[in-house]
Amino acid sequence: MKLAATILASVIASSAAIPNARAQQLPTTGSVESRLGKLELENGYPTESTAKKIYDDIDFQRACQAYLWALPIMAMQQWQQEHITKFGTGNLDYVDYLTFQDKLGLLTANATTPYVMAFPNMKETGPLVIEIPPGAVAGGILDFWQRPLTDCGQTGPDKGAGGKYLVLGPNDPDIKPEGYYIVHSPTVNIWSGQRALDPDPAKAKATIAALKIYPYSQRDNPPPTRHVSPDGRKWSGEQPRGLAFWEGLSNIINQEPVIERDRLMMGMLQPLGIEKGKPFNPDDRQKQILIDAAQTGEIMARTIAFEKRFKGVTVWPGKKWEISLFLKETNQEAPHHTEFDERASWFFEAVGVSVGMMGRTVGFGQVYLESSKDSTGQWLDGSKTYQLHVPPNAPVAQFWSFTVYDNETRCFVDTGVPPDRSSRDKIVKNDDGSVDLYFGPQAPAGKPESNWIKTIPGKGWFTYFRLYGPTQPYFERTWVLPDIELVT
């Protein structure tokens, strides 16, 4: 009894020492100070002004979280619309992103390898066949929530030997014809995204030309696949801003089935004027809340992405390099929850995820190392000059690359020249095989310009250091990439 009394006294004393440790009883009539200001009650009921204030804040909070929740599907919706409106593509067309200029609208693209993308709507086409040629290809087929249906190429079931992938939509019968890798998409719209990895431009071009997409119903006499070039046309894969974000979200919600995971969020969107089966026609109050939430939501996304607080995200102790793609699983599901913040972090910065991109296979796939700060912990600044020393014997079976991105657009820093250097480039190496890279608005005096990436004064930037075909020293963390150093 004495021990119990001692413990109880200790708890009471601790509670007394902590302000507001005990729940505060709301007044029957009176006011309460809160983050929203003064909230008033009359006979236990909220006053009219309090109810309005509370509902405005409920809807604003829901809209901010809905912004983060919708980031992956809104990137797909935006990019699909750019294909249709800017490039004039249809369901059976690929867009080939070959040059630095082609990729200017692509979130965190690699300037080294070509990309080939298609965004077909299977409600219009029926089941689709996607043919992957043999060779150095890596990529995947994803649903519109950017959950991979399958890898393709080197990290897919064809293991680089090529093959035919049959994609069935959410309402298609479960057929199992021989000679196909068969996957089921829970969304009507899908994304086929592939990379050509061969260092020989001629071979890479031939691989791209051999990628095909056509309806399964026309498999005996498939129509030719059209490959379209951006051809200098400006485009943007960024999620739209302001009310356009919510207009796009309403549009894609009305196209796609609601999956079980998202039913609660769909209920939270209804008071904001976004409801499946209904047109988006918000009133003035809803419009203002949605516009404000899109702006605040983007700041939330930037914070989650660039000031990561995930446990274990740092690659090497004491260094500023982080694992950018920090999802535990490609389907964005942890054992007991959906990876909400992890998903928001990656899909604000980037597009696409596949098994190969998770950086877990020795000798194949990719690793994405990210840094937005210098060695002292200061944000990277486009008006300053920095240096990175890449040690020799980088742990890659293929190559490494370093790319500079605009932290607002998440696309290439648009300086008119490629913001990327890789081990495939003609860069100057030190005698031991190491490489010194430089970043700043002007090439540093006395340093090789081939090792310099231009930045923009007045703008922040961040980088991905990619390892293509990561090898054992990376996984063992015995090879260490130093931090980016400010040159004074």
Image: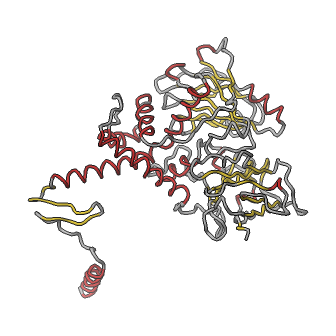
Residue 167 image offset from top left, x and y in percent:
57, 26
Residue placed at 36% from the left, 32% from the top?
A: 280
In the displayed structure, would residue 169 be above or below residue 369? Answer: above
Q: Which part of the image, by quadrant, shows the C terminus?
A: bottom right
Residue 135 image offset from top left, x and y in percent:
78, 33
Residue 129 image offset from top left, x and y in percent:
62, 23
Residue sitting at the far right = 431
Residue placed at 66% from the left, 66% from the top?
A: 374
Residue sitting at the far top = 221
Report which quarter residue 134 is drawn in: top right
Side (left or right) of 307 relative to 227:
left
Residue sitting at the far bottom = 2
Side (left or right) of 129 relative to 188:
right
Residue 91 image offset from top left, x and y in percent:
58, 22
Side (left or right) of 439 relative to 143:
right
- The front one of 350 and 169 is 350
In the displayed structure, would residue 382 be above or below residue 361? Answer: below
